[in-house]
Amino acid sequence: MDIRKFTEYRDKILENVGKVIIGKDEKIELVLAAFLCSGHVLLEDVPGTGKTMLLRAFAKTIGGDFKRIQFTPDLLPSDLTGIHFYSQKSGEFEFREGPLFSNLVLADEINRATPRTQSALLEAMEERQITVDGKTMKIEEPFMVMATQNPLESYGTFPLPEAQMDRFFMRLSLGYMDREQEMGVLSRVSTVDIINSLTQKVTREETEYVRREYVNVRMSEPVLAYLMDIIEATRNHTSFVTGVSTRGGMALYKASQVIAAFRGREYVIPEDVKYVAPYVLAHRLTSGSGTSARESLRFLSEILETVKVPLEEIE
């Protein structure tokens, strides 16, 4: 494994996407980490913070297809997966692919769609395949969904159940830029023009390499035990009805490997685990009293501060 390929890949992505999304290199890196781990991202944020532009720029940088789906209450599963239609020209039924047959999919306001439509999307996310009229079709890799969600108190929404939230690799929030950055964005040329001027910066071979080789980043027994201590602490915390699942533990393990590789190391240290834990774990924690996202993150921060960090030197 050539660790330099990871840092070079990361730098190319951040430089190109950073031309569009100013001052959010940390969040761009986390989206990239989820992408390498074949995971999906849930973005909970106020409108107009650049969520669509982020994924458009990311798609152009890696040379992938991009589709945006606006979720509405009347959206049907077939609007995502595609349909068989009768072609008068050929006299046969032909399949017309839906927007899920793409490399990068933005599912905008996912909680405005009915649970049935949400399930169609989440099935494609988990199984990497779509079944239409009894015929199963594979979705081409790489494939990543970035879903945005309205605040749960909004009218006309269908909140994602906890089991479906667990399907997302990370939950992120871009947030507002600082004053100077936003002034620069307001006075520059159109963001659409900037995106149109972007070119592909990484090859398909480079993408395949980093997505395949990150699993070779080592995690020592003390660090793995530290990761497991965090997982078990969420299960024993009195504020939560259910803690982090095994799927969540696997996601934290993978994300830590990628972050270590981005930092130029072939091994994971406890700081890598602690850094990605809030983004990977917070949305997987549930409370019988209806704990909000902010409260879950606060409780998780308390856990991260109390779990003992291994002091052994990691070689």
Image (cartoon, rainbow, N blue to C red):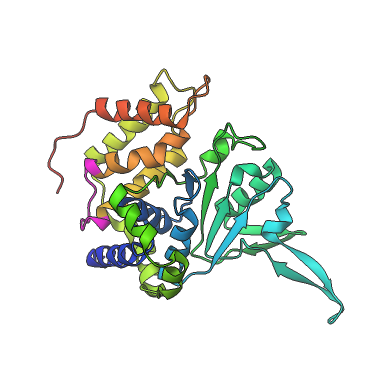
Q: Is residue 197 visible?
A: yes
Q: Is residue 228 left or right of residue 145?
A: left
x and y percentages locating residue 140 in the rendered image: 55, 67
Q: Is residue 43 magenta?
A: no
Residue positioned 52% across, 23% down in the render: 290
* The quarter of the displayed image where residue 304 is located: top left
Splitting the image into 4 quarters, where does residue 98 fall? bottom right
Quadrant of the rendered structure where residue 202 is? Answer: bottom left
* Dominant secondary-structure state across the stretch colored magenta: loop
> Which residue corresponds to the image point at 44% horizontal and 28% vertical from the top-left?
243
Viewer-nearest residue: 315 or 176: 176
- Above or below, comparing residue 265 to residue 103 in the picture: above
State whether residue 24 appears in this view.
Answer: no
Who's the residue at 37% across and 64% down the image? 188
Q: Residue 295: x and y, percent?
A: 41, 26
Image quarter of the N terminus: bottom left
Magenta range: 261-271
- Above/below status of 240 relative to 44: above
Q: Nearer the viewer, residue 162 or 25?
A: 25
What is the residue that sits farthest to the bottom in this orientation?
89
List the single residue furthest toward the front: 187
Judge whether 191 appears above or below 163 on screen.
Answer: below
- Measuring from the top left, give residue 230's x and y in whole percent: 33, 31
